[in-house]
Amino acid sequence: MAASDADQSLNAPTANVFRDVMPVIGMQITKIDAVRKNNPTPGFKVESVPAIVSVEEKELPTLGNNGKVLTINFNFNVEYKPDIAMIKIAGEILFLEEGERVGAKTWAKNKSLPQEMMIEVYNMIFRKGLLKALVLSDDMQLPPPLQVPIVAPKKGSEKSKDGKGGESDIEGQSSYIG
């Protein structure tokens, strides 16, 4: 990739999402509850649902911005259906509002946050929640809560004469644009 191509890719919307807006300054998990009821059956479904429970302004004197941040309490539930398992994660996110502080007011008024803030918060909940749920699902011998790449033999390929397949006899791909 040429230097100008690299510069162009850094200016792509997906690349700037985390560089331009990163007001999440901390996150902690406060509670985890995981229950396995039954073995997964063919055709099972996994649903991951984030929810904001409450928003309040909090004083953190060590910070600038008059020492005020938003504390956003959340739940992240991963449900394996039908009636297979449930992983519940609760926690809080510390969000530093730049400029006019509207998050707590908007939440108090209509139980919602401004769109830009909401996107950042939900992305953080999904990112951290799915990683934690991935580890918990492995510990509980459940399928992962997100699709992971699978390596399989190439269609139409035959094993080499010695019976061992080589690297060229398999296919699998995982892509990521960061």
Image: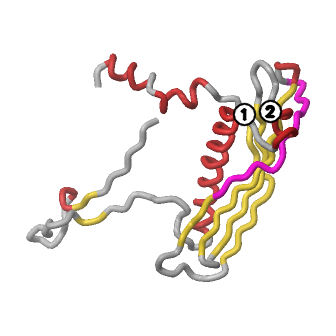
Query: Label 1 is placed on what type of residue?
Result: Pro
Taking the spot 81% from the left edge, 44% from the top edge, the residue there is: 111
Taking the spot 73% from the left edge, 58% from the top edge, the residue there is: 89
Q: Where 106 falls versus 166 (above or below)? A: above
Category of crowding for the residue at label 2, using alpha-carbon neighbours closer than 10 angstroms: few (below 14), some (14–19), many (at least 20)? many
Count of labels shown? 2
Judge left or right: residue 95 versus residue 146. Answer: right
Query: Label 2 is placed on what type of residue?
Result: Gly
Judge left or right: residue 76 versus residue 73. Answer: left
- Location of mark 2 (residue): 103
Horizontal and vertical percent for residue 174? 37, 50
The magenta-colored residue range is 49-62
Separation (CA) of disc 1 from disc 2: 7 Å
Judge left or right: residue 49 versus residue 12. Answer: right
Category of crowding for the residue at label 1, using alpha-carbon neighbours closer than 10 angstroms: few (below 14), some (14–19), many (at least 20)? few
Residue 51 located within the stretch drawn in magenta = yes
Judge left or right: residue 73 versus residue 9. Answer: right
- Location of mark 1 (residue): 114
